[in-house]
Amino acid sequence: MQPRRVNTGAAPNPAQTMDILLAHGYFIAEDAHEQAIMKPYPPLGLLYISSHLKARGFDVAIFDSTFRTFADFVATIKEARPPRVGLYCNLMTKQNVLRMIAVCREHGARVILGGPEPVSYAAAYLAAGADVVVVGEGEETLEELIPLMQAAKAPDLSHVRGIIYAAGRAATGEVGEVVRTPPRPYIQDLSAQPWPDREAIDLERYLQTWERHHGARSTSLITARGCPYTCTWCSHTVFGHSHRRRAPADVADEVAYLVDRYRPDQLWYADDVLTIAHRWFLAYAEELEQRGLRVPFECISRADRLNETIVNTLAEMGCYRLWIGSESGSQRILDGMKRKADVADVQAKTKLLQSRGIQVGMFIMFGYEGEEISDIEATVEHLKKARPDQFLTTVAYPIKGTDYYEAVEDRIIAEDPWEERTDRDLQIAGRHSPAFYEAATRWVVNEVALHREWHGERRPFRLAKLFLNARRGRFGMALNRRNREDDERVPAGRGWAAEERAADGW
């Protein structure tokens, strides 16, 4: 089976100069934390843009940084001399992308930025050397931008929807007026889009990395774009609050292609909420069944978008783990987040999933605005009752452009220069200290594990170890608890955010 529509359209001219080099700033070889995890997936957003542009006759190259080094990027720019470079940027890759912008400018390349990070700080990225920031999806915007940037040294971009640019740049490097054009409509017929241009990268290396570190070849795909929910801490700078789905048959055809071409042992559905539309999901399951496809997979969903029929279908399709954004065991905090979730429902759906042989992972967030120690205690009780197979914790941090950021903006303190920090490093006056949340995490993890052990094997040594660690965590919370009158400046925290777990795209 051949990938659909990746290379259709006008045939590239062999003598044609490269129209654009696409790249991202995730260098796993230079990130010790990511090396410890070693669960890389291909940059689907860039691959979607590549296939779209190739289908329109553009000459596109991709620098996939995942298994490369920054020195490799510098060498590529020096040798290829691309006239334009499109860089995907998120919180995790900000510092690398800033360095990449500088390299591009040094060698005469115009820089177009996309992704969730640059939109809210567009003026700063333009001042750092970027020429254009794309707001929203990048396929159609780049299709319009590239010819304009080819035709003129200083093109008039005012009629290009969905971008932010500087009206002029002085010889000193200072940017002129920052212009934001009207928004570009989202692509409505996603099934008409080419599949990601996976042939442009070494996808086999991703699969081998997964197999070597985790015993199974894994790759990713998306069935939809956007999330319509209103969680206050979640960034919507790429897809807004839209939700658009591909046709079930189109996705099933892509899975058949992946199985035939790459032989994965499992799949990762990178959608924000895979089971959001029940009729669509059941139709998709039927399409897979008709093709005789049952590939084990992992996905994210919401408790309120699960019922017995959906869970049974997930199990029949091969779902082995489903992640739920539980966030808190305090209903008061969930309501403050506008999470539209119910604690008891999360617990019930967790048990339903597990009864069908599906593991449950949970995302838990500490430190959201207004959280008290009693709310953390409620989260511990929630985890004891729900008994997820695993859970990941983070401390809430404000991403610019979100409702959460706006709610705490008057207390945000940025002690480091913009180019040296990300929103993860912002500080919020009046928060508990990092030491408090480190201790809280120790308590929660060990208290929940102690409960599980007590109702399980009851191994004396492990019970004692978990008990002591839990007490140590609770003591640390008391020791580092902030007084109400204390207005010390304390970090907002680090960790997972929905902006990073969402489907990769511009």
Image (cartoon, rainbow, N blue to C red):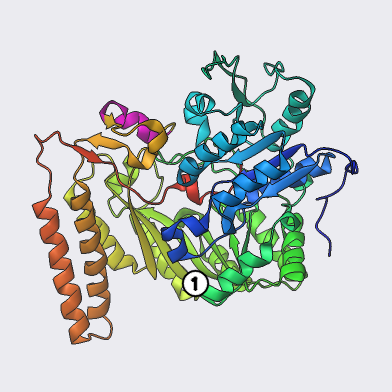
Q: Which residue is mark 1?
A: 358
Residue 415 % position (x, y): 28, 33
Q: Main secondary structure of the magenta part?
A: helix
Residue 471 % position (x, y): 13, 66
* Residue 272 shown left or right of residue 245 in the figure: left
Residue displayed at 21% across by 68% down:
447
Residue displayed at 51% across by 57% down:
28
- Answer whether residue 407 is magenta in the image: yes
Residue 156 vs residue 391, the one in the foreground:
156
Q: For residue 297, which quarter of the picture?
A: bottom right
Give the amino acid type for the residue marked by disc 1 in the picture.
Ile
Residue 87 vs residue 134, the one in the foreground:
87
Above or below, comparing residue 71 to residue 449 in the picture:
above
* Residue 293 shown left or right of residue 336 in the figure: right
Residue displayed at 54% across by 66% down:
311
- Answer whether residue 222 is magenta in the image: no
Count of marks placed on residues: 1
Residue displayed at 27% across by 37% down:
427
Q: Secondary structure at mark 1?
A: loop
Q: Residues within 10 Å of mark 1 (few under 14, many from 20)?
A: many
Q: Which residues are magenta?
A: 402-411
